[in-house]
Amino acid sequence: MSQVADVPTEQVGDSSYDGLRLRGVSKTYPNGFTAVDTLDLDVPRGSFIALLGPSGCGKTTTLRMVAGLETPTSGEIRLAGDDITYAKPYKRPVNTVFQNYALFPHLDIFENVAFGLKRRKVKDVEAQVREMLALVELDSQARKKPTQLSGGQQQRVALARALINRPEVLLLDEPLGALDLKLRRSMQIEIKRIQTEVGLTFVHVTHDQEEAMTMADTVAVMNAGVIEQLGAPEELYENPRSTFVANFLGQSNLIEGTVVSRGSDVTSVDMHGIGVSVPTGRTHTDGEKGWIGIRPEKVLIGEEGEALDAPGNTIPGGVVTDVSFNGVSTQYLVRMPWGQELAVFAQNTGRTRIFRRGDRVELSWRPEYAFLLDFSQDASAGAQKGD
Amino acid sequence: MAEMTRRRGRTGYLLLLPAFLTLLVFFVLPFYSLIATSLYDPSGSDVEGFEMTYHFSNYWDAISDYSGPLFRSLVYGGVATLLCLVLGYVLAYAMAFKAGRWKYLLLVLVIAPFFTSFLVRTLSWKLILADDGFVVNTLQFLQILGDDGRLLATPVAVIAGLVYNFLPFMILPLFASLDRIDPRLIEASSDLYAHPFVGFFKVTWPLSLPGVVSGTLLTFIPAVGDYINAQLLGSTGQRMIGSVIQSQFVEANNYPAAAALSTMLMIVILAMVLVYVRRAGTEELL
């Protein structure tokens, strides 16, 4: 089920890989719930990967297995060639930034950050801690207790406490979940900056797709214990391979269609009587039917009969049913002749007028932006409810 | 504005009144009476009455006559407290971190002995530790106890009784503070290269200190003053200060001596507690 994108399949037990490698890792709890299902994942050394998915998708369990806080039911975890599947957590060169930080409340900031170094009996703890506190801009708070700091500061202490050990892999478990939106945005940039600066491997677990895309080089979208798709944020967003990814990352219009012909460059699809084409590289089904996917911001909206700059796929006969203007753009819902409502985001460039409810419009999009997904998948999988 | 503050102030005093009256009737007056009694002329009796003569030598007499039982009480109380701490910590730790869904059932079981009388429970220990009882026989069989060795009427029996009777007072505060510890902190220490053993002493133990301090106080203070265990499980050789005070009051009717002993015991315990709490760095508990 799960896939490893762009990585040649290598044998289990190959010790030449210097990153983090999970092979066939499963975790089934005593109550029978399988949190992680034969997962394969390669995290190259020095990269920043985000495990993204809804709660219960197995992302945190995966992280905890890498940390050693959970033992896999089967499979193998290797780090820089060493098998660490069953290694004790305190013997792994892996550190975690815990959700809600888990700072030691009885120790001050300095002692919290020094904890790992002292356990390993490292020399010049003092200098290293000072340096680390400077990196996270907390040098002046060294003698305060964690409860005396703000949420953002505590989060930086948690980061410093893990980073100072220079682990092979740094694990971040929803580290920004407790912060308010504004602080979260600035911490995202901060963590990304620190990662670039120290050059360590980061594995970040989050359910916030924007956070994952902003911070990580590679995003692995997880669902029901498997990785649905793995790739660079742009790649995942522009060319999703499943309805879950299409809906979970951003928003997608998914329209039923029947494949008419498959060429070397494009697949022609009949969409409720209208011929549309999808590039072969974005066709992810072998079936006769499929979901034609198009992102709302890729859909152009125009007056009926107006020639739009999108040759290929033009769909007439739409009626605007909902308009919400938010300054930068306008979001429309357009009811199509076959009864489905499509979402359209139009930039307020001033070139076209803002349509009103009840206006008859024509939609179009450039074929290269469309994608075709397997019809057996649930078209609402991964969609955010109540949004 | 001023009207409001004044009214709020009045409500505050009104609410404090019951507590104040309770303290006055049940603490200040008896305490005054105790101190006063300790300074009466001991030549009086409960029938003829005592005369207030500011007889401070009651204290010197008490010390010279009963320094043995006083010292013994502190030792027995101290040993019992230590044993309670070791036993109670293990149990409270298991309850807080390992018991899972059995946690609250175990908690009820810890409190369960309170449903029967303190006296009856202590008397039943007399049967358990009896000379021909199972425990003594087993220990004799294992050659831990000599053939004519016994447990009853020895310090072992008295301390065992104290440990048994005061263990719940140790477990409850320990459990309360251990249960509050976020298990993620222990995970974090493990993640930061601390062997579970090291993690315990660096994280769990310091975070449980408030429970340790209140548990030891709740055990030590009543254990030192206890006389039931010494009386039922010990002999004259194990007399504790509580027994002495009890017999001075009830049997010898020497109220001034008993009051002087009580006051002294209180001062000694208070001094020890102050030093202990200072050293444990948990002044906020006082």
Image: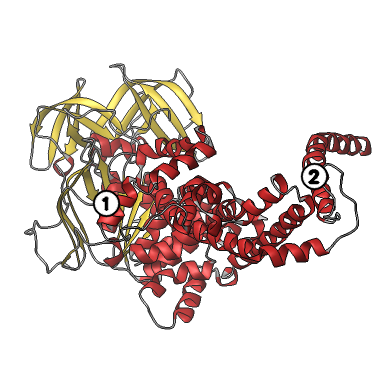
Residue ID at (53%, 67%): A109
Relative to the observer, which residue lies in front, A255 or A261?
A255
Circle number at residue A304: none
The chain under label 1 reads A
Residue at mark 1 to residue at mark 2: CA–CA distance: 60 Å
> Residue under circle 1?
A70
Image position of B216 with respect to A259: above or below: below
**Residue type (three-letter) at the residue carrying disc 2:** Pro
Q: Quadrant of the C terminus of chain A?
A: top left
Q: Residue furthest bottom?
A: A124
* Residue at 44%, 54% in the rendered image: B89
Any part of residue A348 in sight: no
Q: Which amino acid type corresponds to the residue marked 1 in the rendered image?
A: Glu
Please, is residue A294 above or below residue A258 in the view?
below
Could you tell me which quadrant the N terminus of chain A lies in?
Answer: top left
State the image coordinates of residue B143 (x, y, percent, origin top left).
Answer: 27, 61
How busy is the neighbourhood of tag 1: few (under 14 within 10 Å), some, or many (20 plus)? Answer: some
SS at mark 1?
loop
Residue A226 point in image, percent of width and height: 21, 43
Viewer-side residue, A204 vs A373: A204
Residue picked out by circle 2? B30
Give the crowd class for mark 2: few <14, some 14-19, many >=20 residues within 10 Å: few
In front: label 1 or label 2: 2
Picture residue at 93% right of the left edge, 35% below the top: B3
Q: Is there one chain holding both mark 1 and mark 2?
A: no
Q: Residue A259's image quarter?
A: top left
Q: How many marks?
A: 2
Which one is in front, A251 or B244? B244
Rendered location of residue B201, percent (x, y): 43, 65
SS label for mark 2: helix
